[in-house]
Amino acid sequence: MFHSDPSEDHQIVMGLRATRIRLVAGAKCAASQGGQTALVTLYAQLAMLGFGIDLDIPEAALVAPQPPLEGDRLVAGLEAYGRQLWGSTPAGSGGTPQLTIAVGGKAAGADITVSWATDAAFVFPAAAELPPPAATGLPFSPLGAAAAAAASGARAAIPIVAEHLGIPLPTAPRWLDPVGRRISLALSRLVGPIDPDLGWCDAISGGAITSAALYVLLRVPGLSGRLRIIEDDILEASNLNRYALALRRHLGWEKAAALAEWSTETFTVEPSALHLTAETAVQLRPFAPIVLAGVDDIAARWLAQGASGSGRLYVGATSHDYVLVSEHVPGGACAGCVHPRNDPAVDEIPTIGFVSLWAGLAQAAFVLGRSPSLSGRAADVAPLGLEGRRGLRPYIPLPHPRCPLACSASTRLAG
């Protein structure tokens, strides 16, 4: 976004905290499961960016659990979540908000409107006509619409942050124009028929992508199974800007233990406080037939491929404002084919909550809709370019002739 040095961090934070967003929704939307999923997700993503948020939403009973909200009321739960995230509710402080977002239908004074179909997500300028939200129990479309709208919130903050830094606005189009885009995402390209019975799964890393994937999975009706989270790191305050299920009271906890708190009667999350290495892999065996990997380190993705053995591996990866999620099946292109070059990171990786959310959403969709394909699947997502032709691009991963793991698919290609 900006080329800043650490001395400018405070000014960036001040610019984000000075940004105000107003969320508006009617009673029908606020009382529906899809509407609550969209509102909770959008509120949380904006709150994680540090914005002040004005709520013009009627109170309603929660139709289904909406973690990390606690309690059984929508607005009260949102305000309590804000206090858990920041230590105080991220409320606005009067004056005109930089952006007003209407969720589920038109509203006076709105800049953009958010809606969804059973298999599509929409974010349009407020004057445009949009279909009313579909009544859906599945979370993907409301989540996708909220994640897309969160990017507009980030764009609304750019002029304020630039002013605090005393620098010109960025010239990259993806950071400009929070209200003029017409986003219409056909999520059917990502989400197919799903099976909510996941059985036994492993997740390598308890970071932002795994947190986002679990955030999505916990909203799927009838979800059942067992998820072991392999992670030895501790949750820190710097994680709160992108960990979808993290609360301030979790600081100092093991990340895996914090996620295990969201277990349900039918879906158990089990912490395993180990870091995956060639040595600890021996302790962790046997691995589940389904392995999720949400790690920044490419070499760790290769290790995850080895851990998955004859099972299926689902890799969620982000870099700056880009998402790549891939499914790897026995005999198909492996994680080494999709990520053939190690790129050891020595610096902090720029992150933003809704980018991680897209990675988790795609990863959860792939896991729930395990493809019968012998080649696996992959998808690129550009969270700040969703209105373009390449905003969401599914494809089949191909074997790489120089696969570092020399998998069977790449060996056949080379031979």
Image (cartoon, grey):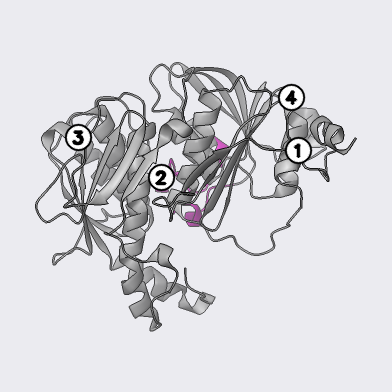
Viewer-side residue, 261 vs 134: 134
Tell me if label 2 and label 1 are in contact, CB under 8 Å. Answer: no
Q: Where is residue 307 in the image (x, y as percent from the top left)?
A: 75, 30
Mark 2 packing: few (<14 Cα in 10 Å), some, or many (20+)? many
Residue in the picture at 58% in, 47% down: 234
Where does label 1 land, which residue? Answer: 399
From the viewer's perspective, is residue 350 above or below residue 258? below
Earlier sequence position, callout 2 versus callout 1:
2
Report the span colored magenta: 234-256
Residue 45 on the magenta segment: no
Residue in the picture at 23% in, 64% down: 98
The disc label shown at residue 330, or none: 4
Earlier sequence position, callout 1 versus callout 4:
4
Where does label 3 land, which residue? Answer: 132
Task: Tell whether 189 sits left or right of 77.
Answer: right
Magenta stretch: helix, strand or loop mostly: loop
Mark 4 packing: few (<14 Cα in 10 Å), some, or many (20+)? some
From the viewer's perspective, is residue 362 above or below residue 267? below
Q: Nearer the viewer, mark 2 or mark 4?
A: 4
Earlier sequence position, callout 1 versus callout 3:
3
Asked whether residue 200 is in view, the answer is yes
Tell me if label 2 and label 4 are in contact, CB under 8 Å. Answer: no
Tell me the CA gap for discs 2 and 1. 41 Å
Local secondary structure at mark 1: loop
Viewer-side residue, 267 vs 306: 306
Where does label 2 land, which residue? Answer: 247
Local secondary structure at mark 3: loop
Tell me the CA gap for discs 2 and 4. 38 Å
Task: Tell whether 5 sits left or right of 353.
Answer: right
